[in-house]
């Protein structure tokens, strides 16, 4: 590892000002960032750890009944606490990485990083979540901007993610056997206003909504409604773990599975 | 009696508590330096310029060496003298060592190695089978061709004929302990090298060659490896030579270990193969003739490619008596890491070729794949191997071969089995089992008579024990009702030839001391890589002296104690070193018996070593007292032992002779399930019956069988090596390359040992066990193919490894 400064602010406002320093970078649970630093994919001079800020940790429900997860909340806590109120989210969180990753990695860090194979972006997008930062609220539909890209500005911190609770939901993850990252992951959520389907792991431009499937499912929420519908291989990721055609095929299979499992 | 006892591995308590010492755990001398290679990032090119100023200026760097700084090429090849330690103006694979950094710490060396600026004139690498074949880049001037009868005529005359092809992937060894070496300069220019190696003598030889020293000036040592699997037969040479050269230059101890990514990129792997088959057969599935074409990618240097490819040819018949056969083998020189030894040494690839073909014949004929195999089996030896089944009462202690030291045995005398006269033993036979044909000699495609075959009886026993027929019918019925998930069941046998095919390697030495307190120091040329060799040989030594195995001190393999050893490879470790140790022990025992008999007016033959005691007539004393007495009577209590495998003769160019002392057998039935929507799959159950002769240690043998099966199944399912179109290995860490974990072993896993004795006079009539069970994993691959075949009328033609994506493609092919 190279030499860098580390700050551990205990309040959001301190963190915001610390991030104004030249070359500063927010550090969540560090499960992606630290390996990136080791590989010298990034070399920030100052790391501002968000792990001591209590006000962005924890889970609650707001007046509209939305589940609100603090940006600094580790996946393990979501897995443990949302089993009854939003089981699909709990199940997603329980399948991220391994216990060490789940105890350190945070929802805010994962969303801000927007890894194309990460699970959280699919949940946020399918749930029409609102991502609250230290300065604004952003709809999930507007938040993701391609591989490892979001609309977050320099120094902007994800403080909370608000998930409307669906009538039914399920997350299907096809894990790459070695890394256990999603080769393809599909999150299906059914709301009164309609069904949303978000796909992670598959596309060269990151998480996306499969609108054709959403339309079919909004009028008939059953796996049968998806018969004959397939996703094109164009634009899908082709790498050592799978071809674009295979990933496209998995999108169809996993979406049906998610619908069937959501019931 | 300490043999035939299921004792735990001698180092098990150390392994599980982390106290077992590996190379990197040895306290190094003060001032020890650490090494790292700068690697070529490209697969083929000329070095135009090298700027290593930044490397030299990096913190902690003591010296930086290129080829020009070396005393000579410092060749690290085990075969053709074609692997200079550092690139000589040209690079031939991505990962080849170009320069060597010597620094004050492991980290400093690694960091500095990344600072090298090397300019290359890139050239087009040879990577694929077809382009390399077209370029004529082969290790031998012409392909090896072995023939039995006229295969072409037999195929043409047969009622049926089919042709097919299977692609078989390679495999990373993934030993838990990576490659590591430590060189300590000794007096007068001598060198002491401690290496994680299966072949200390090779290390000694290569180090001596690089330093320009006689071998007597180099001492090579290895207490244990954290796994070898063939990956430390030749691949440790580069580290040991680098350390020795650096130690000589600096006068300080030098240590080197590869980081996991470097290890995977630099070192060779299992050979991948492409096998074409053209077979003529009849309506019952009986084969009239086969023409195999095996093509393998050997990588940039020869390493062990020739004997590996030979062994693939030698196992092209697997368990089947082929009336006519032609095997053609191309050994390609590609711009990839140099493929090397890996458990089975080409055998598994050869076996998979014919097993796949058997499967396709069964599919075409619509008959049970097991039946196609059984009609083609060699006939069992009379008596079926002295067999009871695994349920038969085990004889109390197998009798040791009485004439083990005699090299001039009359031909075939080894086949006289104790306790099982020819034809008197009970055979297991189902109604489809072919009748034994002991009269007419049955020969392999390379002209070796098969006299110890067991698989007819073993197959019948295994199929009955695991209810193969009932489960196969149940699976078919289940598949009818299950549109998405399909189950499959697969059977595969293995007949594996035991001996090095380079005949002179079949020798071993041992050194045994008995101290005056009765404790025993055991040393031999074999190396311990977790397989339990040391414990098995210690059991032999303990049995010869009639003492508890705890009284035998196991010591590190050391070329200063036992010289001119062969690699611990070819499954032969126990066969060779057990015999050598027995010879050494018996020499001491005879001297002790003579001395004690003299003191008690008895005959030496009447002296009994048993139960920790030595008895001479009425007198009894502890082994320690006996040792003291012998010492006081000035008896030498130290001896060497030597063994060479008898009756071997092999001509690899003609493909004729007896390359093997005997065959080890096994068979397995695996049940799997696949998801026809995604290709995901898992093993549900495995049943194994394996032949280890009279087991020296049933616990250790069982461990080898279980581990071999899981590693074999991993090779054919999840373990996928991916090189990109520039020849760079993309799977060089556990995050991209999936080896089986504990949770991947079959949830139902029944392993039984076939209770028999080796008809050949091996150590306590046991059989080698290291490699043969690896091939039982093929049953998992065949089960996956069976599940794919349940999806439609066509043959799925599954390639290996059967990743989810390949299984899905096979399902589509089955549907048509």
Image (cartoon, grey):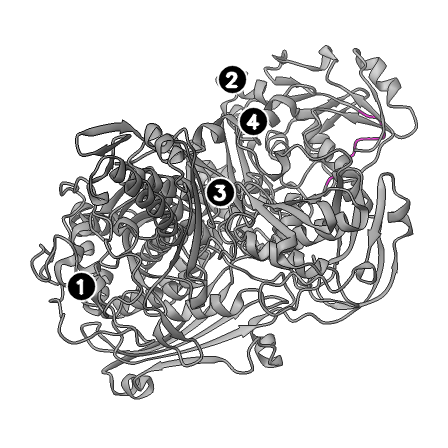
Is B420 in front, or is A29?
B420
Q: CA distance from mark 1 to mark 4?
A: 57 Å
Disc on res. A93: 4
Percent position of residue A182, x then y: 57, 40
Is A154 in front, or is B37?
B37
Are callouts 4 and 2 both on one chain?
yes
- Residue holding disc 3: A254
User: Would residue A153 be counted in the magenta stretch?
Assistant: yes
Disc on res. B380: 1
> Which callout, 3 or 4, points at the residue further toward the start of the chain?
4
Residue numbers of the magenta segment: A148-156
Quadrant the C terminus of chain A occupies: top left
Percent position of residue A147, x then y: 72, 43
Q: CA distance from mark 4 to mark 2?
A: 14 Å
> Which callout, 4 or 2, points at the residue further toward the start of the chain?
2
State left or right for residue A112 relative to residue B576. right
Q: Residues within 10 Å of mark 4 (few under 14, many from 20)?
A: many
Based on the displayed image, in which of its 4 quarters is residue B716 positioned? bottom left
Q: Nearer the viewer, mark 3 or mark 4?
A: 4
- Residue holding disc 2: A85
Are callouts 1 and 4 both on one chain?
no
Q: Residues within 10 Å of mark 3 (few under 14, many from 20)?
A: many
State left or right for residue B211 relative to residue B278. right
Q: Secondary structure at mark 4?
A: helix
State left or right for residue A35 relative to residue B497. right
The chain holding disc 2 is A
- Give the residue displayed 39% in from the left and 33% down from the top: B632
Q: Secondary structure at mark 1?
A: loop
Q: Nearer the viewer, mark 3 or mark 1?
A: 1
The chain holding disc 1 is B
């Amino acid at each position: 590892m190279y030499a860098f400064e580390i700050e551990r602010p205990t309040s959001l406002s301190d963190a915001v000002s610390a991030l104004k320093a030249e070359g500063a970078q927010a550090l969540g649970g560090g499960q992606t960032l630290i390996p990136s630093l080791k590989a010298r994919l990034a070399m920030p001079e100052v790391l501002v750890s968000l792990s001591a800020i209590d006000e962005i940790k924890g889970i609650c429900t707001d007046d509209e009944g939305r589940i609100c997860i603090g940006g600094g909340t580790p996946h393990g806590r979501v897995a443990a606490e949302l089993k009854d109120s939003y089981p699909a989210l709990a199940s997603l969180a329980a399948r991220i990485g391994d216990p060490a990753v789940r105890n350190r990695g945070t929802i805010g860090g994962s969303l801000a990083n927007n890894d194309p194979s990460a699970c959280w972006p699919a949940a946020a997008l399918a749930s029409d979540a609102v991502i609250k930062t230290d300065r604004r609220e952003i709809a999930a539909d507007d938040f993701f901007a391609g591989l490892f890209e979001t609309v977050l500005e320099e120094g902007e911190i994800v403080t909370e993610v608000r998930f409307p609770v669906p009538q039914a939901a399920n997350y299907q993850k096809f894990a790459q056997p070695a890394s256990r990252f999603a080769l393809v992951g599909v999150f299906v959520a059914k709301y009164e206003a309609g069904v949303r389907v978000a796909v992670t792991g598959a596309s060269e431009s990151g998480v996306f909504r499969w609108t054709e499937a959403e339309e079919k499912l909004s009028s008939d929420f059953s796996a049968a409604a998806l018969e004959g519908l397939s996703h094109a291989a164009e634009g899908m990721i082709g790498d050592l773990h799978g071809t674009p055609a295979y990933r496209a095929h998995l999108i169809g299979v996993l979406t049906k599975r998610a619908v069937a499992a959501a019931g | 009696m300490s043999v035939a006892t299921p004792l735990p591995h001698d180092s098990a308590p150390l392994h599980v508590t982390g106290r077992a010492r590996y190379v990197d755990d040895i306290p190094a001398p003060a001032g020890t330096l650490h090494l790292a290679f700068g690697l070529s990032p490209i697969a083929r090119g000329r070095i135009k310029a090298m700027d290593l100023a930044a490397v030299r200026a990096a913190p902690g760097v003591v010296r930086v060496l290129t080829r020009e700084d070396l005393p000579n090429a410092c060749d690290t090849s085990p075969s053709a003298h074609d692997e200079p330690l550092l690139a000589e103006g040209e690079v031939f694979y991505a990962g080849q060592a170009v320069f060597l950094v010597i620094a004050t710490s492991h980290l400093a060396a690694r960091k500095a190695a990344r600072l090298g600026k090397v300019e290359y004139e890139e050239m087009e690498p040879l990577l694929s089978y077809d382009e390399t074949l077209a370029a004529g880049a082969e290790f031998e001037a012409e392909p090896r061709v072995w023939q039995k009868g006229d295969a072409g005529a037999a195929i043409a005359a047969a009622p049926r004929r089919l042709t097919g092809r299977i692609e078989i992937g390679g495999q990373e060894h993934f030993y838990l302990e990576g490659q590591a070496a430590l060189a300590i300069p000794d007096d007068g220019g001598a060198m002491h090298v401690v290496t994680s190696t299966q072949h200390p003598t090779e290390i000694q030889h290569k180090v001596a060659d690089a330093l320009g020293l006689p071998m007597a000036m180099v001492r090579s040592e290895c207490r244990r490896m954290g796994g070898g699997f063939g990956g430390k037969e030749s691949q440790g040479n580069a580290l040991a030579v680098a350390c020795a050269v650096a130690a000589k230059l600096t006068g300080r101890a030098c240590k080197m270990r590869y980081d996991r990514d470097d290890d995977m990129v630099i070192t060779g792997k299992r050979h991948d193969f492409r096998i074409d088959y053209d077979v003529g057969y009849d309506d019952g599935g009986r084969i009239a003739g086969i023409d195999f074409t095996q093509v393998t990618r050997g990588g940039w240097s020869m390493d062990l490619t020739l004997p590996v490819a030979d062994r693939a040819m030698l196992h092209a018949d697997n368990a089947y008596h082929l009336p006519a056969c032609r095997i053609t083998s191309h050994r390609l020189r590609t711009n990839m890491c140099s493929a090397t030894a890996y458990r089975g040494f080409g055998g598994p690839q050869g076996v998979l070729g014919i097993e796949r073909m058997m499967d396709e014949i069964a599919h075409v004929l619509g008959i049970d794949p097991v039946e196609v195999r059984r009609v083609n089996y060699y006939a069992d030896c009379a008596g079926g191997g002295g067999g009871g089944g695994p349920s038969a009462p085990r004889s109390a202690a197998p009798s040791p071969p009485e004439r083990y030291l005699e090299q001039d045995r009359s031909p075939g005398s080894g086949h006289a089995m104790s306790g099982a006269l020819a034809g008197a033993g009970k055979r297991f036979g189902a109604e489809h089992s072919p009748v034994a044909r002991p009269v007419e000699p049955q020969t392999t495609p390379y002209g070796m008579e098969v006299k110890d075959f067991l698989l007819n009886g073993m197959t019948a026993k295994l199929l009955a024990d695991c209810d193969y027929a009932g489960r196969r019918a149940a699976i078919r019925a289940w598949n009818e009702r299950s549109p998405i998930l399909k189950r499959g069941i697969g059977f595969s046998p293995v007949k594996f030839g035991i001996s090095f095919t380079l005949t002179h390697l079949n020798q071993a030495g041992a050194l045994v001391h008995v101290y005056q307190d009765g404790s025993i120091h055991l040393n031999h040329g074999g190396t311990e890589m977790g397989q339990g060799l040391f414990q098995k040989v210690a059991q032999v030594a303990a049995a010869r002296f009639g003492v508890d195995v705890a009284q035998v001190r196991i010591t590190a393999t050391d070329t200063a104690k036992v010289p001119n050893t062969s690699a611990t490879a070819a499954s032969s470790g126990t066969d060779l070193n057990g015999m050598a140790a027995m010879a050494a022990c018996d020499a001491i025992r005879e001297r002790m018996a003579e001395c004690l008999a003299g003191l008690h007016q008895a005959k030496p033959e009447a002296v009994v070593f048993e139960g920790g005691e030595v008895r001479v007539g009425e007198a009894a004393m502890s082994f320690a007292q006996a040792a003291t007495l012998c010492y006081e009577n000035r008896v030498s209590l130290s001896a060497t032992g030597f063994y060479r495998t008898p009756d071997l003769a092999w001509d690899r160019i003609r493909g004729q002779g007896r390359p093997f002392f005997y065959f080890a057998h096994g068979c397995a039935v695996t049940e799997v399930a696949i998801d026809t929507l995604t290709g995901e799959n898992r093993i549900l159950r495995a049943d194994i019956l394996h032949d280890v002769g009279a087991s020296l240690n049933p616990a250790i043998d069982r461990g080898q069988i279980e581990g071999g099966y899981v590693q074999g199944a991993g090779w054919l399912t999840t373990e996928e090596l991916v090189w990109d179109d520039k020849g760079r290995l993309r799977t060089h860490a556990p995050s991209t390359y999936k080896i089986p974990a504990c949770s991947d072993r079959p949830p139902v896993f029944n392993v039984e040992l076939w209770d028999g004795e080796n008809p050949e006079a091996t150590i306590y009539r046991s059989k080698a066990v290291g490699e043969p069970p690896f091939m039982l994993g093929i049953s998992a691959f065949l089960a996956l193919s069976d599940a794919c075949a349940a999806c439609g009328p066509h043959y799925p033609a599954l390639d290996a490894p059967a990743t989810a994506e390949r299984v899905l493609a096979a399902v589509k092919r089955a549907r048509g």
